[in-house]
Amino acid sequence: MARKKSGAGRQLRFELPVSAVLPRLATVDHGLRNLVARGGHDGAYTMAVTLLDTPDHRLLRSGVRLAHRVVDGQGDWYLAAPGWAPDLPERRILELDVEGDLPAEFAELITPFRRTAAIGPVAALDAERREFWLRSGDGRTVGTLIDERVTVRRGGLTVSRYAEVTVTDDGLDQAQRDWITAQLVAAGATPTEEFPRLELRLGAPATGRTDFPDGDLAEPSFGGFVAAVLARRLQAMVRGHLAGPAATSKLLTQTRRLRRELQALTPVLEPRWAEDLLDDLAWLIGAPTDKPVDSDDRVLRGDRYLMVLEALVSAIRLPRVAETAAMPTTEVTQSLVDEALREVRARASAIVPTSPIATWQAARDAADQLLSVCQVTAPVLGRKVEKLGKRATRLRSRLDQCLDDRRVELRHRAEVDPASAFDLGRDYERESMRVQQVHEEFVTDWPRLARKLS
C-alpha cells in the first residue's frame, strides 16, 4: 500500500525483523558518506489503511484492492487492479475524507467482482514509512532507501507485523551494493527478489484461487477443459462490462459466444445444469435491449445479472460433465465432432427437393451445431477441425439459401385489387421456381459436399 513508487533503477529488496534497527550504512572504504533522511510529506509519513472486501475476500482473490486510507490525517479512497488494466485502473486515488460511503465510481467498477456479496472492512494496516538518500563521499545521491514497517490487524487482533527495506540504485557500484547487502544482512535482513503479496500477509481466505482464472484450453481432462472454456469467456464478459455502458455490445458478444460454446458441448454435459446456464445466458443476451443502456436502472445493474455472474463463477469451480469429467479432452472432443458430423450427414441425406421446411431446418441446425463444435474443439484438435469448420460454414450458408423462401410472405400480402393480385401471383410463381431450383441444386450437390465433410 505504499503511497508513492520509488525512482527508476535497479532495486535491492530485504525483509527485516520489525524490531531491527537500520545500520548506519556509511563507509569511507567504499565511498559512502551517510544516510540523509528525506524531508517533506512524501519522505516520511504514517498511514492507516482500512482494507475493504467481501467476507470471502473475492476482490483480493481476483486481483482487486480497495481501501480507505488516512495519510498524516488526510483521507482518500484507493483502488488498484494492475492485472485488469486497462479495463480497471492500475492505481486510482480519490481524495475524499469520507470513510463510510464508497464512491459511486469505485462501486460501479467493482460490481462484477463483488456481485451479490456485501462489502465491508476485512483488515486494518498501520504503516510507517521513512525514506533516505544514500550520499557518496563527494556528496552525490547514489541511491535511495525506503524503510516501511506494517502492522496488520483483523477483528482487532494483530495477525502480522513486517518490515520491508528497498534500496534503489541511482549510481552505486557493485562493491557498494555488496557492502550494503552485507550490512543489512548483519542487522537481520533477508534479501528477496520480491516482497510477499499482501494476500499472503493476510492469509486465508485472501490466498484462495481467483474467481476469474485465465483458463488453459490444453487441460488434459475434459472437466478441466470445460472449466477453461467458461473461464476464458467469463473473463472476456467482465472486461466487456468494465468497458462501460457505451460498450455493452462487447459483453453481449462474449455472452453469445459462450452460449454457442455451451450448446456445442451440451451432449456431454449434465442436462439440467447445462439447461439452467443456457437459460441464464439467453436471458442476458435479450435483457439489455428492454431498457436504455444508460438508464439508472439498466439491467446490467440488476440482481438477476449479478446472479448470472455468480452462476458462471460456480460453474467454473465445478463443471457438471457427468461421467466424462476425468476422460482425456482429446477423446471427448473428438467424439463430439464425430457425433455432430454423423448428425449432419443423416439430416442432409434425408432431404429431397420436395421435403418440408422442417426437414431443411433440421439439416441447417445440424450444420450450425457442427460449426459450433468445430469452433470450440479446434484449440484441442487442431487444423483438421478448423478446416472442417470452414466447410460446415459453407454448408450452413447453402442451407440458409434453401430456407430463404419468400412465398410465406407473399401469401400474407394484403392487396386485394385485381391488378395487385395478378402481380402477386406472378411473383409467387417466380419464387416457387427459384426455391425449387436451389433445392434441386442442393440435393444434386450433396454427395460432393458429403465427401468433403470428412
Image (cartoon, rainbow, N blue to C red):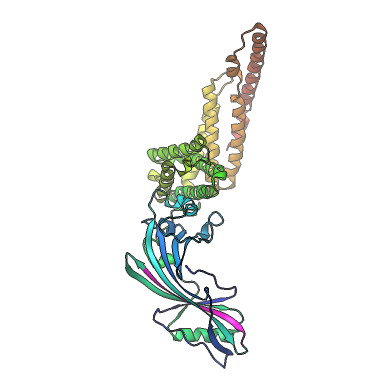
In the rendered image, residue 346, in percent from the top left (x then y), is placed at 51, 29
- The answer to whether one can see residue 421 in this image is yes
Please identify the residue farthest to the bottom as the structure is shown. 29
Instruction: Please tell me in which quadrant of the rendered image residue 253 appears.
Output: top right
Residue plotted at (47% across, 41% down): 297
Q: Is residue 343 above or below residue 136?
A: above
Please check the rendered image and state whether residue 142 is part of the magenta-colored stretch, yes or no: yes
- The answer to whether one can see residue 446 in this image is no
Q: What span is in magenta?
A: 139-152
In the rendered image, residue 454, in percent from the top left (x then y), is placed at 57, 38
Q: Is residue 51 above or below residue 257?
A: below
On the picture, is 376 further left or further right than 410? left
Magenta part, dominant SS = strand
Q: Is residue 122 above or below residue 271?
A: below
Residue plotted at (55% across, 38% down): 371
On the picture, is 394 further left or further right than 64? right
On the picture, is 414 further left or further right than 285? right
In the rendered image, residue 437, in percent from the top left (x then y), is placed at 65, 20
Residue plotted at (61% across, 20% down): 406
Of residues 229 and 85, the one nearer the viewer is 85
Q: Is residue 407 above or below residue 54?
A: above
Of residues 172 and 50, the one nearer the viewer is 50
Please check the rendered image and state whether residue 288 is part of the magenta-colored stretch, yes or no: no
In the rendered image, residue 230, in percent from the top left (x then y), is placed at 47, 47
Of residues 310 and 124, the one nearer the viewer is 124
Number of dots carrying numbers = 0
